Amino acid sequence: MKKFMIMVAIAFSIASCQQTTTVAPFIKKRVMVLETNTISFVHIPIGLDSIYRNEDTVWVNLVTHRIDDLDSNTMISVIKP
């Protein structure tokens, strides 16, 4: 029983010491919605962050906060630094 308790204690200590590092799959950029002159944020996938640059005009879905030109909940916006 003593060995079992020691093994459980070791297992818990190892599990509690491990840190999980997560990389966000998106970069958050600020946009100005031109139709309402409001500031919002958009989530750009890391692979596309080199395509969308500051001062680019994009269609932003205001429900999901993603660049989207197919949905009806989109408004034209400008990416700001």
Image (cartoon, rainbow, N blue to C red):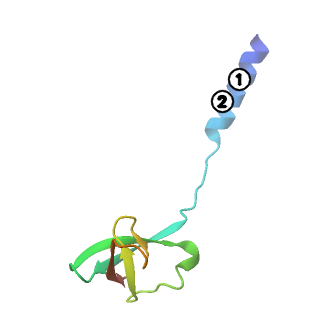
Which amino acid lies under the numbered mark 1 shown in the image of this protein?
Answer: Val
| Residue at figure coordinates x 71%, y 17% from the top left | 5
In front: 3, or 67? 67
- Total residue callouts: 2
**Image check: 35 left or right of 10?**
left
- According to the image, label 2 marks what residue? 12
| Residue at figure coordinates x 35%, y 73% from the top left | 72
Looking at the rendering, which quadrant does residue 37 occupy?
A: bottom left
Kindly give the residue lying farthest to the top in the view shown: 1
* Structural distance between the alpha carbons of marks 2 and 1: 6 Å
Which amino acid lies under the numbered mark 2 shown in the image of this protein?
Answer: Phe
Looking at the rendering, which quadrant does residue 81 occupy?
A: bottom left
* Residue 59 screen position, x and y as percent: 38, 80
* Residue 41 screen position, x and y as percent: 35, 71
* Residue 4 screen position, x and y as percent: 76, 17
- According to the image, label 1 marks what residue? 8
**Image check: 53 left or right of 6?**
left
Marks 2 and 1 close (CB-CB < 8 Å) = yes
Neighbor class of circle 1 (other Cα within 10 Å; few <14, some 14-19, many 20+) is few
